Amino acid sequence: MSTSVDQSFVKQFEAEVHQAYQRMGSKLRNTVRTKGNVKGSSTTFQKVGKGTASTKARHGKVPVMNIDHTPVECVLVDYYAGDWVDRLDELKTDHDERAVIANAGAYALGRKTDELIITELDTSTNYADADTDGMTKAKVLTAFEMLGTADVPDDGQRYAVVGWKQWSELLNIAEFADSDFVGSEELPWRGTQAKRWLGTLWMPHSGLSVASSVRLCHWFHKTAVGHGSGAEVKSDVTWHGDRAANFVSNMMSQGTSLIDATGVVTLRCLEA
């Protein structure tokens, strides 16, 4: 038997985990600022303030905006997800155990990525209305006004993540779900459960925080949150003779930080 078989197996397994993570692992990673290949235990995102234009006298100096640059540190943390695969168990199953373990590890790491992003979004204190009712049209419009008042760019990079209960409530709002208002191409049930409304991509998520029956939903701009990655998803498969099993270990090094709190509006929704 070739001595390179095990290494070939590990490389193939790692590729499968990486593909599964990219395909189904994280729903929110592409909705925030992302910096990869970070060297060291942390990275820095720059928060840039607003500039002001003004006039100048003929032959005078061009006025300097003196834009404020505030560095925001993002600390990376190592995360692992592993499991045992017994050698004889593989002979008793009629499915690809390797693919099952690869998907399970990738999904676990993907949920952790989303959890890190949601934790930062939860630090927002820009609340739209009270927390005594669910997702209503009035609450959505209040949040919409707050984003506009704060000069959050309406450039196609706004995202709204809501719980499944709130997604159902949105479907009862005619302006959200009725083709007479949004057109047949923007209906929420075309393909995946996500749709564009009010210049924002809306999507449901099962991992949003809830306390005392109040779910924290978030409407934010992509530049408001940063995600740093020191090591993408990697896998290691090690044979343990004393256990007659392979130990499959998946790992990554990632971190998140809230860059600009004004770019996040939180909608607190009561779940009856």
Image (cartoon, rainbow, N blue to C red):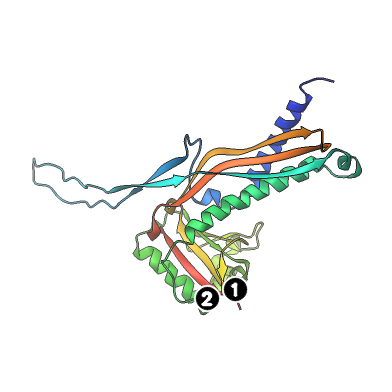
Quick one: 239 or 159, which is closer to the camera?
239
x and y percentages locating residue 170 in the rendered image: 57, 71
Residue in the picture at 47% in, 36% down: 40
In the picture, the disc for residue 198 is none
Residue in the picture at 26% in, 48% down: 67
How many residues crowd mark 1 within 10 Å: few (<14), some (14–19), many (20+)?
some
Task: Point out the tag, 2 or 1, that comes first from the N-terminus.
Answer: 2
Quick one: 164 or 236, which is closer to the camera?
236
Determine which residue is flagged by label 1. Answer: 169
x and y percentages locating residue 134 in the rendered image: 55, 76
Query: Can see residue 43?
Result: yes
Q: Are marks 2 and 1 in contact (CB under 8 Å)?
A: yes
Q: Quadrant of the N terminus?
A: top right
The amino acid type of the residue labelled 2 equals Thr
Quadrant for residue 174, please give it. bottom right
Q: Circle 2 sits in a helix, a strand or a loop, which is it? A: loop
Mark 2 and mark 1: Cα distance apart in space = 7 Å
* Residue 186 drawn above or below residue 72: below
Residue in the picture at 82% in, 42% down: 96
How many residues crowd mark 2 within 10 Å: few (<14), some (14–19), many (20+)?
some
Determine which residue is flagged by label 2. Answer: 136
- 118 relative position to 191: left or right: left
Q: Circle 1 sits in a helix, a strand or a loop, which is it? A: helix
The amino acid type of the residue labelled 1 equals Glu
x and y percentages locating residue 131 in the rendered image: 49, 76
x and y percentages locating residue 177 in the rendered image: 59, 69
